[in-house]
Image (tube, rainbow, N blue to C red):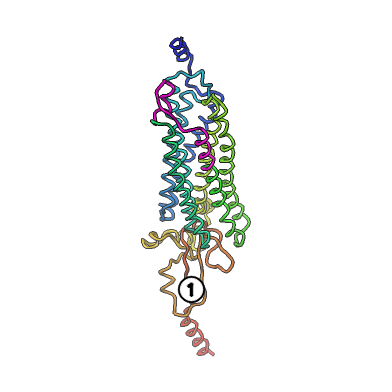
Amino acid sequence: MDVELDRRLTQNFSHSPSAQGRPLFIFNIISLIVIWFSVFLRAYVRSRVLKSWGPDDYLMIATLLCFSWMSGGMLAIVYCGFGKHMTTIPPDWLIEGFKGYLLAQLGYIMTVLFMKLSVATFYLRITVLRWQVWTVYVLMGINIIYTIGYFIMILNQCTPVSYLWTQLAGAKGHCLPDRVILGTSYTHNTLSILSDWILATMPLFMLKDSKLNRRTKVIVLFLLGLGYFASVSSIVRMHSLPSLNKSDDYTYTVIPIAFWSAVEAAVGILAANLATYRPLFSSLVDTVTGSGSGSGGRYSSRFAAWSLGRRGREHGYIMSGHGHDLKSLKTEASTEPQTTNTVSAGLEFPGVRGTSDEELGILKQTEVDVTVHEQRRSRSRKASRSRG
């Protein structure tokens, strides 16, 4: 009887996504294209425009690979019948589907970790407040430690690992209680939400006292809003977790959780990459409008400042408003200090001068002592006296 039922299920089974699984299938295909393109643009800006490739960029590449790993697992489970009722899926495809589901779980865990680390490392390059630096380090440490433990637990939720799918064929083994998996998943989601809120809120402390124009502030707030939206996806995902324990139709009820996991990861990655595109947009505006032509172009000197020498490329880049780097400033300076400029993330804060709000994306905090050469002034005074 079971053999006949399996034969009928196999004959009637279709790999086409069901109404439940179709949104997950379509979203993963679209998000893969968008995320790969967004990371490509980020890599272009950092490596070709700014000549300043940092640790956060390496972490974003790792995030991209893990996201592709996760999306591949999600596409596989839909192909194997997830999204349909469990009783309508042939046992052979159920086994393959649960293999893909484990891969998708592990890929999601690592995607979230590397994404958080990339964003946190980016903030370390622009923050000027000591308490924010320590907050980011503590947040990174907690995420790394807990995620490693959570990854190991999910990987070994069944003993042997293969029992997760071979139990459907009558194999022997055992799995962790549902309450253990649910509890650790709640903790992981809560940590992810708190991390999103903290990382998205910290720039507000710099933004509220800055002298940026309204348009730039709106752009920054939009990017921060994407970070908050990623946390909303985590909240929806966490709200869906208990449904797995209340249902025997696992292949049907797991789809909303997988969908919101994909949304959380995709939105978070996209927001992190958008924050690095400002120099590219500025250069495109320069090209389209022709505002950079001639010696008085608005962006020409600034774009020149992006292309410093080898030493400047190794340590980030500095915007001076006139295309000067630290070396030229040091050459022109005398021994009498007049003012101190702090350059950080292209933002202009109270008491801080030397950059405008046009250049977002400064990669390092640098203090420059600018002095005035008095010799030229004395010569001009002597010349005026001689004329008199």
Relative to 227, 325 lies left or right? left
Residue 96: image x %, image y %? 42, 25
Number of numbered callouts drawn: 1
**Residue at 40 percent of width and 62 percent of height:** 312
Query: Observer-nearest residue: 275 or 155?
Result: 155
Residue 149: image x %, image y %? 44, 43
Q: Does 388 appear in magenta?
A: no
Query: Observer-nearest residue: 321 or 58?
Result: 58
By secondary structure, the bulk of the magenta-drawn segment is best described as helix
- The residue identified by callout 1 is 370
Amino acid type indicated by mark 1: Val
Q: Residue furthest right?
A: 214
Which of the image's four quarters has the C terminus? bottom right
**Residue at 59 percent of width and 49 percent of height:** 222
Q: Compared with residue 202, is residue 350 higher up or lower down, i.e. above or below?
A: below
For label 1, count other residues whose C-alpha is less than 10 Å away and answer few (under 14), some (14-19) or many (20+): some
Q: Compared with residue 264, is residue 284 higher up or lower down, i.e. above or below?
A: below
Q: Does 163 appear in magenta?
A: yes
* Helix, strand or loop status at disc 1: strand
Q: Which residues are magenta?
A: 161-187
Residue 354: image x %, image y %? 52, 67
Q: Compared with residue 12, is residue 346 higher up or lower down, i.e. above or below?
A: below
Residue 385: image x %, image y %? 52, 89
Q: Residue furthest left?
A: 310
